Amino acid sequence: MKLLDIGEYKLSKKATLLMILGIFVFSVACRMIWVYQFSDMDSFKWNNELMINTNDGYYFAEGARDILNNDLTDSRSPTDTFVSKLTAFLTKILPFSLETIILYMPAFLSSLLVIPMVLIGRTLGNTYLGGIAALLSSITWSYYNRTMVGYYDTDMLNIVFPMFIILGFMLSIKQQHIKYTLISIISIILYQYWYSASYSLILALVGIFAIYILFKDRKNRLNFLFIALLLFSMASIPILLKVLLISGIYLATYYLKDKILAYSLYILAIAFLLVLFTGGFNPILTNLKLYVFREAVASDLENLKLHYFAVTQTVREAGQIPFEVFANRISGHTITFILSLIGYVLLLIRYPIMILTLPMVGLGFIALKAGLRFTVYAVPIMAFGFSYFVLVSSKIFESFIYNETTLKYIKGIFISIAILYALYPNIKHIEQYKVPTVFNKQEVKVLDKLGQIAKKDDYVVTWWDYGYPIRFYSNVNTLIDGGLHSGDLNFPVSFILTKDQVSAANMARLDVEYTERREKEHFSSNLIQEMKDYKFNDINQFLNSLHSKNFKLPEKTRDIYLYLPDRMLNIFPTVNLFSNLDLVTGKRLPQNFFYKTQRFRDLGNIIDLGNGIKIIKNGGKIQIGRKVLMLNSFIVTEYDRSGKLQKHIQNIDPTSPIYVIFMKSYNRFLVLDKKMFNSTYIQLYVLENYDKDLYEPIILSPFAKVYKLKI
């Protein structure tokens, strides 16, 4: 054990505070690199400020905007969330715009991580242990990626709160005083309010804390009170009742300690039952199903079952990742990760209390199966592992350097080099991680104009990636967004974008009107309710019936707009997946052909599009792999000087299923089959070929186009 002893180095409170402040400034400064890189990019700015770089951030920004405008009537706006309320509060008290606040909040709030990191090291007896860990964890890949300037989301504090919870645990155990439990209790309450999916981690942390202290000293009745107070803080009861309950027990313990301790086991039993009967374990099963057990999602109502495509099958954050990516995201480099892992194991041996961090490590390591988003949870704990490994390794010099001054100097150099070695790949990552804003200025101009045309109750139909930004900039409703994108909700929107114009128009009106009905009538599925109302027993027959212009639609209650951005071309095959399946069996239908490229070579008679696809000019043919096919049509589109789209169409073989579109203004080729070619998105956005009975062009921009539904 002496070999693993790194000594007691508890800096003074003033020195500790200066260390925290210095590392905090370092963390914020590293995040300002992104601002420096894009400060001259006018296309990334709106209202004279850089825009944020995460779609989900616009969800909370919408809530903050509505709070500031005193518009609390829309139940879909997150005006009751902690993030939106805090953002609105900061905007009110600080001399900055909402756009500036949401841009920089992540950098400052996430850097608060250094506080519990340093203090945990100090609690273990070595402030430098926490300082080195804080320095590394504050800018490590995955933590930086999810807390950089512009990444305005709950991730700002999603690691900060758990580390404060662990800090409170350690202080409670070491100091044996209930006042330190308040650090954990307050953090738990705030964490639950801040992040709705935090419960599983909180439960795991409280569980490991309970096991540890009961195993260590089960006869200590104060431990029962520690656990009981933590359970009360977790219970799904009104926050006022929760505060009163905890405050009452805390004060009673303070003034009537002996009497309260005598009943501590009963208080613990009551707390456990309260958590159990308020659904204490349900969130765990939900999260496991969402991220670990991924499959087609079924919607079932009165024996009518439809199978949809699960969104987690397409989200990279929810997919398995290679080990190298896993290691880099947790520590910045594979070697650093291995050293951190070794250090963490040694840390557990030297300081058994670090067992309290196992849930964080476990959740982080789940990333190998459940997706890269989880790696961030292991970052601070592995940083402790690296810090400890470095401090233990520095002891090697004690075996052959006996001069205390020289030893201290050599140790300092060694530790400094090790820290720089660990920081370097992370700083390089920050320099190279040039994430663009969610939208560019021209796209936001379209949304701003749409907001001036559409009413707040109107709907905009588009893919879920753009839902939150549209609601923020245009102040309208959307069918799907970053939070509402389950398979049954995605299917109608995918159908609208990828099917013919008549079917799309009918589905758009149906889905919007039934979405409004569902708000009042609370039926579980739009499609199933539509089938019942239209007296269809077969979903495929119902969907085929939408192809008719004579389909009887429900009464129109609001306007519907289609938002069709150029950037959707990048994900169009993915969009198609959600409706290109048999809803009865859940099996995918034959894959449609869609190929997009801006990398091509004109070789005279042949245009090489890459990936084995070549256009043969003579005869109007195309080679796809080993197959040579006639082209149905070759279409060239380009914008003239007035900004109007011009089309040049060369019809070749009407029996061929393959079309080629050269979008000259974008220097882009599209190769697509008949279904993709006739899709509403391609016809309306790429070709501006719209059915005048069904659609009216509202905004026609090279960046995005908006059509109004006439029916």
Image (cartoon, rainbow, N blue to C red):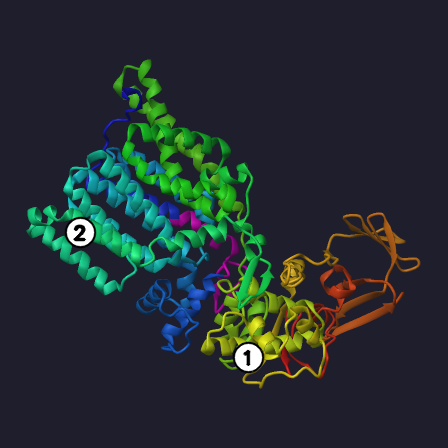
Q: Which residue is mark 1?
A: 513
Measured as percent of width and height from the top left, residue 364 is found at 43, 43
Residue under the point 66% across and 60% down: 581
Q: Is residue 426 left or right of residue 588?
A: left
Nearer to me, 536 or 155: 536
> Could you tell me the amino acid type at mark 2?
Ile
> Could you tell me the amino acid type at mark 1?
Glu
User: Is disc 2 surrounded by few (<14), some (14 to 19) or many (20+) residues within 10 Å?
Assistant: some
Locate residue 352: give its quadrant. top left
Q: Is residue 40 magenta?
A: yes
Q: Is residue 704 magenta?
A: no
Q: Which residue is mark 2?
A: 267
Secondary structure of residue under mark 1: helix
- Residue 275 is tagged as none
Nearer to me, 606 or 655: 655
- Which residues, given as a range, are shown in magenta? 28-55
Measured as percent of width and height from the top left, residue 490 is found at 58, 65
Q: Residues under labels 1 and 2: Cα distance? A: 51 Å
Figure check: 5 above or below 158: above
Total number of numbered discs in the rendering: 2
Quadrant where the N terminus sits is top left
Q: Is residue 65 left or right of residue 566?
A: left
Q: Is residue 257 visible?
A: yes
Nearer to me, 192 or 123: 192
Figure check: 192 above or below 545: above
Measured as percent of width and height from the top left, residue 186 is found at 25, 54
Figure check: 352 above or below 267: above
Measured as percent of width and height from the top left, residue 383 is found at 38, 37
Residue under the point 88% across and 65% down: 655
**Looking at the image, is mark 1 or mark 2 nearer the viewer?**
2
Q: Which numbered disc, 1 or 2, marks the residue that appears first in the sequence?
A: 2
